[in-house]
């Protein structure tokens, strides 16, 4: 049951017929894992906490640096030098003390991914490297957890949802990240944020949209982004949506899957961590 203080806090959501008291209690009981407390994870964490998600897990091995603050709004100047997980938890506590946090100040690796992911109802991936994205995708598939995925460029971003452990109305598996992006780009072809740059508010747009999609998935609201990639281009101020489908040749949930655990990630993660 919601306390009088919680009713006052969430009253703008409670009056929504799509949410109401029952929906708010579902949010209160939900457990969401956010991978990365950076540019995407920051607005995502803030809006999930504000919405009253019961437990937010945050995994990130980095510490806050001054050049993070232009876009990573869950942190502030006094947080520079602190672990991003602890900085994010302190902000959540100030924003909404009803939210429980679980912190993982470590990298997500094949050895811990299934244990961590399996402890949550849904995962939101705001990581900034391809090795982690493929690992999160595969772990969510194996653990049967929905995945809201987001990524950004200097002035653009994209967003989708994966429920690859389910089948569609025709009995085919739903697509995974590997159906959308079969292979990572060759090393060195996609410059990191430190080289390419980014307009901070673009990460804010995509992170906020990711929070909306997490809440929709938890409550079963509206139309899911499963099988649809939402694209945002800031310069022409344009949104568009592209449909994509299950790839029967993908190695995870294709017709002849080759990946049955996470051991194939060990080499990729070792390269990413060099």
Image (cartoon, rainbow, N blue to C red):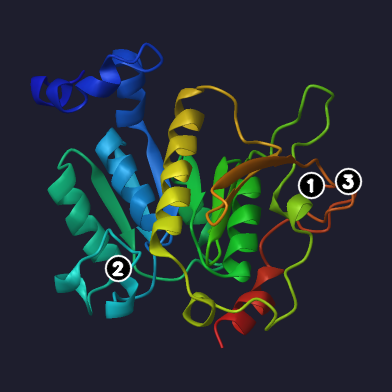
Quadrant that contains the C terminus: bottom right
Mark 3 residue element: loop
Mark 3 or 1 closer to N-term? 3
Q: Nearer the viewer, residue 111 or 33?
A: 33
171 relative position to 137: left or right: right
153 relative position to 5: left or right: right
Classed neighbour count for the residue bearing mark 1: other residues with Cα under 10 Å, few (<14), some (14–19), many (≥20): many
Quadrant that contains the N terminus: top left
For the residues labelled 1 and 2, say whether their Cβ atoms are less than 8 Å apart. no
Where in the figure is residue 214, as x and y percent of width and height? Answer: 46, 38
Looking at the picture, does residue 6 appear above or below residue 68?
A: above
Looking at the picture, does residue 148 appear above or below residue 84?
A: above
Q: CA distance from mark 2 to mark 3?
A: 39 Å
Instruction: Please name the residue that numbered disc 3 is placed on.
Output: 248
Mark 1 or 2 closer to N-term? 2
Q: CA distance from mark 3 to mark 1?
A: 8 Å
Residue 262 visible from this viewpoint? yes
The circle drawn on residue 84 is 2
Residue 110 visible from this viewpoint? no
Mark 2 residue element: helix
Q: Residue at x 35, y 64 (%)?
A: 71
Q: CA distance from mark 1 to mark 2?
A: 34 Å
Where in the figure is residue 75, as x and y percent of width and height? Answer: 24, 64
Q: Residue at x 17, y 58 (%)?
A: 90
């Amino acid at each position: 049951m919601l306390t009088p203080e919680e009713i006052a806090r969430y009253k703008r959501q409670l009056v929504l017929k799509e949410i109401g008291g029952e929906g708010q209690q579902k949010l209160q009981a939900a457990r969401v894992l956010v991978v990365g407390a950076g540019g995407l994870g920051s607005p995502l964490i803030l809006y999930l906490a504000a919405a009253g998600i019961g437990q937010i897990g945050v995994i990130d091995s980095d510490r806050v640096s001054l050049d993070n603050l232009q876009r990573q709004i869950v942190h502030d100047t006094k947080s520079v030098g602190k672990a991003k997980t602890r900085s994010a938890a302190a902000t959540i506590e100030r924003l909404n003390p009803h939210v429980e946090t679980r912190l993982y100040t470590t990298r997500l690796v094949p050895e811990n991914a299934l244990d961590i992911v399996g402890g949550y109802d849904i995962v939101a991936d705001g990581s900034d490297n391809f090795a982690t994205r493929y690992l999160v995708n595969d772990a969510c598939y194996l653990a049967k957890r929905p995945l809201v995925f987001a990524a950004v460029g200097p002035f653009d971003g994209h967003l989708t949802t994966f429920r690859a452990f389910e089948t569609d109305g025709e009995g085919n598996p739903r697509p995974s990240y590997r159906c959308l992006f079969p292979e990572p780009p060759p090393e060195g072809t996609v410059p990191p944020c430190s080289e390419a740059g980014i307009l901070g508010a673009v990460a804010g747009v995509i992170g906020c949209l990711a929070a909306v999609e997490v809440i929709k998935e938890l409550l079963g609201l509206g139309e899911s982004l499963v099988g649809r990639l939402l694209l945002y281009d800031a310069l022409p101020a344009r949104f568009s949506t592209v449909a994509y489908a299950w790839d029967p040749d993908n190695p995870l949930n294709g017709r002849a899957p080759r990946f049955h655990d996470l051991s194939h990630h060990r080499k990729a993660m070792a390269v990413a961590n060099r």
